[in-house]
Image: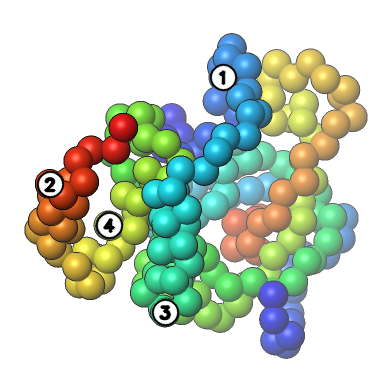
Amino acid sequence: MSAAAVPKLEFSQGDRVHVKDMTPPNHHRTPWYIKGRRGVVLEFIGMYVNSETRAHGDSGMPELPMYRVEFEQTHLWFDYTESPSDKLWIDLYEHWLERDE
Amino acid sequence: MPAVHDRGGWPTDDPIDREEHEWADWERQTQSLRTVLDSKGFMNVDELRRGIESIDPAEYETSTYFERWSASIETMLVEKGVLTPKEIDDRAKALRDRWGYPS
């Protein structure tokens, strides 16, 4: 994370979002089990180099907004048998998120 | 069906092996090589990951952690024109001829 100016952010704390259900051919770190799932934005955690382009010989600039998003474990795993209040926190680039009303 | 590297949540009945193991010398060298190549601007960690993700799924399954690193480093150096596959193979053969296969 750098001290670069933060642009206008698409999301803020408490926003309900879902992760885009897509599998682009380029490198990306969004795991399969989160795609298409609904969560809540916990916080904006900073601007980060775009690893999806940096993996393909690019500089990875400009940096992109990253958010920490919370998901219910019972929403991710149909056979989840631990506490129903368990959460998953995962950091996702803004362009993977879409707003839910 | 997720790609072979996209591993989280795959079903298994096997226990998770949490044992630490001793590093082999070649694993340390692989780690060091990756770091040097990054600091010299030849490849970054995201490219390392992309190279790992491009490994044939069957080979991925039978490879160890640093074998995947080694394969990715080779992929990247060939892709960037730093080395050719023949140069790598010739050098590997010369080392094997001199030292034999690792036990």
- Residue that mark 1 sits on: B11
Which element type, helix, strand or loop, lies under badge 1? loop
Q: Are marks 4 and 1 in contact (CB under 8 Å)?
A: no
Q: Are marks 2 and 4 on the same chain?
A: yes
Where is residue A29 drawn, in percent x and y? 54, 52
Give amino acid for label 2.
Answer: Asp
CA–CA distance in space, label 2 to label 3: 30 Å
CA–CA distance in space, label 1 to label 3: 40 Å
CA–CA distance in space, label 2 to label 4: 24 Å
Give amino acid for label 3.
Answer: Lys
- The answer to whether any part of residue A24 appears in the image is no
- Residue that mark 4 sits on: B75
Q: Are marks 1 and 3 in contact (CB under 8 Å)?
A: no
Q: Are marks 1 and 2 in contact (CB under 8 Å)?
A: no
> Of the residues tagged 4 and 1, which is closer to the observer?
4
CA–CA distance in space, label 1 to label 2: 43 Å
Give B18 or A43, whichever is nearer the viewer.
Answer: B18
Which element type, helix, strand or loop, lies under badge 2? helix
- Residue that mark 3 sits on: B40
Check the image and name the residue furthest to the top. B13
CA–CA distance in space, label 3 to label 4: 17 Å
Where is residue A65 drawn, in percent x and y? 68, 70
Q: Are marks 1 and 2 on the same chain?
A: yes
